[in-house]
């Protein structure tokens, strides 16, 4: 049995290059394809054995700590997995920060993923926080890299955690040429978290790897402290969004991070017609409960004929606050796995008029597929600790 700590897993992921990312991307898409094919087949034929078993996740909420512990079992025809993670109390409801270094641990997701062989043997244990962020960002890259008509020059990322970090890293690793991406801007509610993670740790590494890249970051808290207050934040936000080509939303927000009008340059608000507006890629992965939403209704439905790409139709209809509040019909949703079911599984997305919208709430099969692949890679490259007797 191989135990891969968060540190070893982080080192492994940071060593990935374009070709290895493409291989992992293929593994994830194949798993999603099997899932979607099974969903479609089961809808037409009853009594057919399933390849993927993915019971609904269960949760326990701690009244004392305000945290939520999630339990997610899953299996396919190669192995079984069981992820347990604890999501801390939202920062806006947390107890006051004490200034201790340990405070950062309070705001981070923690847990493990167990990978078992078909006969029940424990093959490995991996730290779940890094994998959860990585596999979600990797899922986002599937539609992101399949809309070549949308430029990739300017990216705006909402959030300051691992999800935000891996969306930036994987965008640069999965595009054919990282020089396509010229500028990445991070926006967060709290400045302290932004400074301690993105500015202090991520920026120096990205600048070393990609000298051409322009990086910027600011917080709503910081901007609203200026003389113009809220107007200063809104003006800067609108300016950045109007120029953006892609927007990655990675926060558990309960109110929209921006409005549809924020995407329109101020000089064009009164004259622009929907058909003439700039097309963007917009992903939503931070909201995972019915009361959460990262964008408004008009932005959500700004894809061609209101089309939205999702990881799972069933899961998103039950958990995605944006879809629930908008009462989106399932007929408007397309699963990523359906891309594999086409004749050309590497083909670009249909080029319609409008934004490309992707919503992801996460599934156990994503953890199993990527966790298993990373476990094999860790074993090959000498990461982790071998424990006998399991």
Image (cartoon, rainbow, N blue to C red):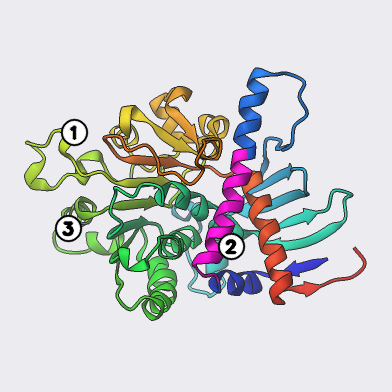
Q: Is residue 282 left or right of residue 386?
A: left
- List x then y, in percent, for residue 323: 43, 31
Q: Which SS does the magenta portion mostly show?
A: helix
* 146 vs 63, nearest the viewer: 146
* 93 vs 164, nearest the viewer: 164
| Label 1 – label 2 distance at C-alpha | 39 Å
In which image quadrant can residue 347 be found? top left
Does residue 61 appear in this view? no
Contact (CB < 8 A) between labels 3 and 1?
no
Q: Secondary structure at mark 3?
A: helix
At 46% from the left and 50% from the top, the residue drawn is 140
Q: Earlier in the sequence, mark 2 or mark 3?
A: 2
The magenta span reads: 16-33
Q: Is residue 259 left or right of residue 175?
A: left
At 59% from the left and 42% from the top, the residue drawn is 32
- List x then y, in percent, for residue 151: 28, 54
Residue labelled with disc 3: 232
Residue 259, above or below 373: above
- List x then y, in percent, for residue 160: 42, 62
Q: Given this view, does label 2 or label 3 mark the residue nearer the observer?
A: 2
* Crowding near the residue tagged with mark 2, few <14, some 14–19, many ≥20 C-alpha atoms within 10 Å: many
Q: Earlier in the sequence, mark 3 or mark 1?
A: 3
Q: Secondary structure at mark 2?
A: helix
Check residue 274 in the rendering and tell me which mark sits there, or answer none. 1
At 85% from the left and 71% from the top, the residue drawn is 387
Residue labelled with disc 2: 130
* 223 vs 209, nearest the viewer: 209
Contact (CB < 8 A) between labels 1 and 2?
no
Does residue 381 appear in this view? yes
Residue 86, above or below 58: below
């Amino acid at each position: 049995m191989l135990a891969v700590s968060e540190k070893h897993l982080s080192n492994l992921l940071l060593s990935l290059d374009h070709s290895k990312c493409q291989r992992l991307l293929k593994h994830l898409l194949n798993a999603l394809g099997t899932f979607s094919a099974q969903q479609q087949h089961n809808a037409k034929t009853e009594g057919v054995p399933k390849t993927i078993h993915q019971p609904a996740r269960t949760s326990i909420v701690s009244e004392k700590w305000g945290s939520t512990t999630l339990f997610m079992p899953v299996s396919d025809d190669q192995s079984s997995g069981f992820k347990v993670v604890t999501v801390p109390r939202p920062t806006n409801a947390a107890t006051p920060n004490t200034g201790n270094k340990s405070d950062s641990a309070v705001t981070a997701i923690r847990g493990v993923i167990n990978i078992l062989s078909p006969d029940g043997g424990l093959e490995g244990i991996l730290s779940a926080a890094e994998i959860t962020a990585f596999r979600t960002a990797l899922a986002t890259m599937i539609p992101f890299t399949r809309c070549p008509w949308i430029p990739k020059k300017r990216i705006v990322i909402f959030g300051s955690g691992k999800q935000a970090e891996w969306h930036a890293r994987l965008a640069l690793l999965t595009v054919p040429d990282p020089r396509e991406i010229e500028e990445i801007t991070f926006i967060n509610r709290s400045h302290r978290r932004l400074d301690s993670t993105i500015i202090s740790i991520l920026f120096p590494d990205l600048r070393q790897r990609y000298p051409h890249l322009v990086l910027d970051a600011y917080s709503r808290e910081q901007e609203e402290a200026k003389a113009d207050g809220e107007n200063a934040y809104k003006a800067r936000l609108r300016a950045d969004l109007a120029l953006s080509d892609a927007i990655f939303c990675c926060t558990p927000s309960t109110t929209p991070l921006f409005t549809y009008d924020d995407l329109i340059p101020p000089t064009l608000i009164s004259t622009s017609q929907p058909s003439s507006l700039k097309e963007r890629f917009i992903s939503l992965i931070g909201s995972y409960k019915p009361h959460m939403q990262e964008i408004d209704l008009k932005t959500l439905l700004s894809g061609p004929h209101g089309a939205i790409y999702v990881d799972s139709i069933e899961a998103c209809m039950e958990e995605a606050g944006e879809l629930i509040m908008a009462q989106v019909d399932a007929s408007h949703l397309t699963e990523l796995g359906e891309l594999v079911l086409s004749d050309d599984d590497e083909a670009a997305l249909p080029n319609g008029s409008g934004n490309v919208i992707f919503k992801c709430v996460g599934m156990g099969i994503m953890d199993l597929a990527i966790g298993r692949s990373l476990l094999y890679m860790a074993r090959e490259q000498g990461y982790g600790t071998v424990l006998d007797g399991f």
